[in-house]
Image (cartoon, helix red, strand yellow):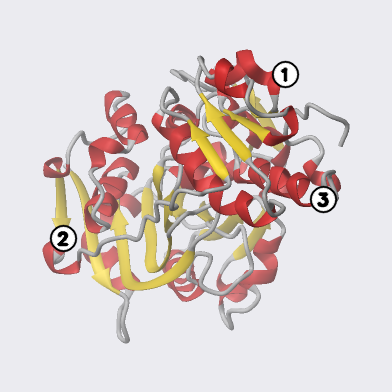
Amino acid sequence: MSVAAVDRFEPGFSLAERLERDFGHVFAGLRPGDEVAIKANMFVTTPGYHTDLELLSQLAGYIKELGARPVIVERLDVLEEVCARHPTLPDVATVRSLEHVPTRVIAIEGATALRQDIAVPVIVPDCDLFVSAPQFRTHAGVLMSNAMKNLVGILPGYTTRQVHHVGLSEAIVDLNRIRPPDLIVADLINTIEGNYPISGAAYRRGLVLTADNVVAADRVAADLAGFDADQIEYLGLASAAGLGPASLGAVRVLGDLAGLRFQAVTDVPRPSRAIELAVDQACDECQRFARSAQEMFEPHLASGDRLLVAAGPDIGPKLEEYPARRAVIVGNCSYVHRRRGIYLEGCPPRALQARAVADFLEHDRISVPLHRNQCRWPVPV
């Protein structure tokens, strides 16, 4: 049976004591000099919007005391900048951006979405122990981002678009097939909640979740945050693939789960007078993306301007009511309409694509070069 523990992160909390007492089996085969890769969430530099540095320092320090070599990894170069803020973290762990780690092209055994060979930093499959150290977030597309989704960040920048192109939920499961984490130390100290990744705010929840299975960790996190785990598609897919327990009842939870629960903030954007939605035929994830994108688009519309955001296979008649410059077409299921407006491929698309549309709406052109190739544009941009 998988084991998970939930603790309050308060003065006197010792991650080492929890690991020593309840997760010794994870480290049983670790030898002096072994490499332990710790995948953190370090995509932004704003304090509170990344894996807690003190928690990372305690984790790396414990691994170093065992004689192993902790290496904190994340795809972006901001990793080093953020980790340098902690007084001891650079002393107890090596910090490496995965953009600068050699890659190996592999085929993911059993993959259902990422079926093509894909480049993966060699440290992920080759390390002696693999730890996922995510920061908990709500997510406008897949509802929740924690340990499983953390592995999206192992891919080099030039391959990450594939994850959304082939279907985010299934791709998350496929990435966890490459090298399932041996240990999860999840930061629910400061969580990012709301309409993320379009927007979101930090909330102080003050919790640490430790587990020896990635699916178990996310099922406990879902319960803690008030989610119905059955609505999180990648959890069901992962359990069906044999990656972890199919229910919370199959997890031995240590700690006062009932007394530590909170209700995560999951903003549902209010209807907009300027933006019409036609998304009822789309999948749940693209519907959520389309509704959440309203928040980003509306401030960039001129007074009296109108915009259509549509998704699904049969939206043709509605598109006739809007010029192509003011029709945003969302998702793979809308591909047949791709020439009728601003087309955002993906299931769901990425937040960066929504930012590109907002840029176009505000300036009637693309002002940021990075945005130029994020969408299929109906006009020169």
What residue appears at the point 56 percent right and 17 percent down from the top-left corner? Answer: 317
Residue 219 - label: none
Residue 339 - label: 1
Residue 375 shown left or right of residue 116 in the figure: right
Residue 339 shown left or right of residue 36 in the figure: right
The picture places residue 76, in percent across and down from the top left corner, at: 68, 54
Going from N to C along the chain, the mark reached first, 2 or 1, is 2
Quarter of the N terminus within the rendering = top left
Q: Which residue is mark 3?
A: 363
The picture places residue 149, in percent across and down from the top left corner, at: 46, 43
Say above or below: 300 vs 256: above
Whole-angstrom CA distance, mark 3 to mark 1, is 21 Å
Whole-angstrom CA distance, mark 2 to mark 1, is 54 Å
Which kind of residue does numbered mark 3 sit on? His
Q: Which residue is mark 2?
A: 254
Nearer to us: label 2 or label 1: 1
Pick out the residue farthest to the front.
304
Which quadrant holds residue 325?
Answer: top right
